[in-house]
Image (cartoon, rainbow, N blue to C red):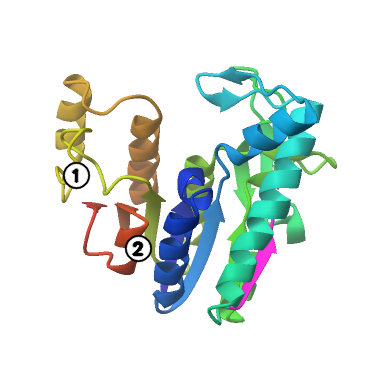
């Protein structure tokens, strides 16, 4: 049985035109599907309005108590409910959730580097997720988990999506899609049409050696290969427009 897991970037979520394109494409995906989202600059914009300073380390937020409250309010509240409402408007039976709901995802607190209440996934409740999926419910997950001790943790979404895909790979034939603001892995970041249609480990290593893929994008591809190693059939990296035709973008098998 096929399952499509899509992680959509915050830069798509915060752009009304891209979001409209994405939701239309996601709604048209046939079969079982699951959506994971982040929120990008929306939290920073709200933080500025209410006087909360979000500190960061290599573009990752340091999640102190005030920052955690803000992220939950924006991501699990505004962003999640907006996505669910848009999907319901397209007759998709979406349900907004965090990893704490139904004990879906449990994490441990990341210690190195110390990013505050940031989690690393340790357990995904594949049985509970499967019950939702097999009941024709489309889970829409915001990037929060729990530690089993009553605490909420914030999770990096590329890694979160990979872990959810791995946990379900024994039950479904999974395609994991990373949907963001570019058309795929690009040979030239200034040329949106320079998409690498397929990416092997050896080719990826060559790109890394040439410093063509670095930083947060390398993290995305590393998670893609990790998912493949744990039974995920295919990972696709594509754009909001590309979600409507998954033959486009960069394919990793």
The span from disc 1 to disc 2 (Cα, nearest Å) is 18 Å
Front position among marks 1 and 2:
2
Quick check: 242 left or right of 13? left
The local crowd at label 2, few if under 14, some if 14 to 19, many if 20 or more residues have their Cα within 10 Å, is: many
Per the image, is 161 magenta?
A: no
Residue 252 appears in the figure: no
- The residue range painted magenta reads 93-98
Per the image, is 97 magenta?
A: yes
On the image, the x and y values in percent for residue 226 come to: 38, 42
Q: Is residue 222 above or below residue 171?
A: above
Callout 2 secondary element = helix
Per the picture, the main secondary structure of the magenta-coloured stretch is strand
On the image, the x and y values in percent for residue 7 come to: 47, 53
Quick check: 222 left or right of 122? left
Q: Is residue 6 above or below residue 201?
A: below
Task: Please name the residue that numbered disc 1 is placed on.
Answer: 199
Residue 48 appears in the figure: yes
**Residue at horizontal 23%, vertical 33%?**
189
On the image, the x and y values in percent for residue 21 come to: 41, 63
Task: Please name the residue that numbered disc 2 is placed on.
Answer: 243
- Residue at the far right: name it: 150
Callout 1 secondary element = loop
Quick check: 44 left or right of 230? right
Dividing the picture into quarters, in which one does residue 141 lie?
bottom right
């Amino acid at each position: 049985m096929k399952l499509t897991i899509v992680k959509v970037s915050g830069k798509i979520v915060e752009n009304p035109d891209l979001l409209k394109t994405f939701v239309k494409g996601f709604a048209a995906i046939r079969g079982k599907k699951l959506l994971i989202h982040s929120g990008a600059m929306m939290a920073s914009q709200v933080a500025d309005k209410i006087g909360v300073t979000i500190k960061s380390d290599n573009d990752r937020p340091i999640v102190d108590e005030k920052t955690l409250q803000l992220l939950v309010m924006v991501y699990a509240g505004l962003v999640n409910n907006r996505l669910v409402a848009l999907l319901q408007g397209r007759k998709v039976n979406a349900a907004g959730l965090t990893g704490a709901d139904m004990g879906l995802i449990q994490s441990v607190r990341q210690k190195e580097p110390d990013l505050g209440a940031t989690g690393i996934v340790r357990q995904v409740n594949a049985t509970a997720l499967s019950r939702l999926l097999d009941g024709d419910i489309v889970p829409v997950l915001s990037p929060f988990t729990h530690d089993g001790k009553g605490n909420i943790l914030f999770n990096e979404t590329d890694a979160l999506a990979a872990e959810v895909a791995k946990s379900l790979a024994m039950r479904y034939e999974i395609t994991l899609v990373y949907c963001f603001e570019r058309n795929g892995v690009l040979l030239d970041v200034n040329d949106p049409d320079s998409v690498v249609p397929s990416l092997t480990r050896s080719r990826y290593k060559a790109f890394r050696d040439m410093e063509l893929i670095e930083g947060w994008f390398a993290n995305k591809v590393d998670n893609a290969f990790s998912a493949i190693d744990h039974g995920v059939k295919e990972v696709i990296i594509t754009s909001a427009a590309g979600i409507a035709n998954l033959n486009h973008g960069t394919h990793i098998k």
